[in-house]
Image (tube, helix red, strand yellow):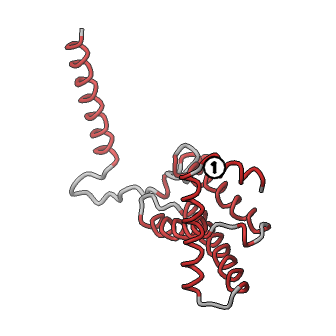
């Protein structure tokens, strides 16, 4: 039974490969002819806008569409933090948002297919992170007139002490969070 399944699998795989080779050969112009190869952009010319979007390499049938849609949630959460006071914002979290937004914006132009929708989401994620980070730095600067580097070190130490406290005493951290 298992050997029969294996033979059937390889037979079907070979047939599939031959069919795809035939499709490729029939879509390319014959060698030595003056035939013009088909334009991939013009392949959807007879379709409507909705059909073009649906069949696009970054359309709703692909992860290239749904990943940016889901990532908008992170951007909207960052935007909603604009209403929070700067002393309650996390510097490390907003630096991470800023860094990932910047890195992935660049990467969206490198990958194929190039995904402008995802690049726009990542760029706005960078903008949200940069805005929140600047708010945090300006808040700390207003408390004490010191250099920007000192403020970054101080904020990082505060975040580190907070995390250490959570690791050492998770129950106590939970109780302090419930009080706040």
Q: Is residue 65 left or right of residue 137?
A: left
Q: Residue at x 31, y 50 (%)?
A: 28
Where residue 40 appears, as percent x and y from the top left, is 44, 56
Residue sitting nearer the eye, 178 or 80: 178
Where residue 24 appears, as percent x and y from the top left, is 31, 45
Q: Residue at x 67, y 48 (%)?
A: 174
Instruction: Judge whether 106 appears above or below 168 on screen.
Output: below
Residue sitting nearer the eye, 113 or 87: 87
Disc 1 crowd rating (10 Å Cα; few below 14, some 14-19, many 20+) is: few
Does dot 1 land on a helix, a strand or a loop? loop
In which quadrant is the N terminus drawn? top left
Q: Is residue 16 left or right of residue 107?
A: left
Q: Is residue 148 left or right of residue 178?
A: left
Q: Is residue 80 left or right of residue 52?
A: right
Please identify the quarter of the rendering in which residue 73 is found.
bottom right
Q: Residue at x 52, y 71 (%)?
A: 102
Where residue 18 appears, as percent x and y from the top left, is 25, 34
- Residue 171 seen from this side: yes
Please identify the quarter of the rendering in which residue 13 is found.
top left
Farthest top residue in view: 1
Instruction: Judge whether 51 appears above or below 157 on screen.
Output: above
- Residue 46 seen from this side: no
Residue sitting nearer the eye, 86 or 108: 86
Where residue 155 appears, as percent x and y from the top left, is 60, 74
In which quadrant is the C terminus drawn? bottom right
Circle 1 is placed at which residue position? 48
Instruction: Judge whether 13 appears above or below 34 on screen.
Output: above
């Amino acid at each position: 039974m298992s050997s029969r399944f294996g033979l059937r699998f390889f037979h079907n795989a070979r047939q599939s490969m031959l069919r795809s080779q035939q499709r490729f050969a029939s879509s390319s112009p014959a060698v030595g002819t003056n035939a013009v190869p088909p334009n991939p952009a013009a392949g959807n010319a007879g379709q409507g806008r909705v059909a073009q979007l649906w069949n696009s390499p970054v359309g709703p049938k692909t992860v290239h569409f749904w990943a940016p849609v889901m990532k908008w949630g992170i951007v909207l959460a960052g935007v909603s933090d604009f209403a929070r006071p700067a002393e309650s914002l996390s510097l490390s979290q907003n630096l991470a948002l800023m860094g990932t937004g910047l890195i992935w914006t660049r990467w969206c132009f490198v990958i194929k297919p190039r995904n402008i929708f995802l690049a726009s989401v990542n760029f706005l994620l960078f903008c949200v992170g940069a805005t929140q980070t600047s708010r945090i730095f300006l808040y700390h600067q207003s408390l004490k007139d010191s250099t920007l580097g000192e403020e970054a070190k101080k904020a990082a130490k505060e975040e580190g002490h907070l995390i250490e406290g959570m690791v050492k005493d998770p129950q106590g951290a939970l109780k302090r969070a419930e009080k706040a």
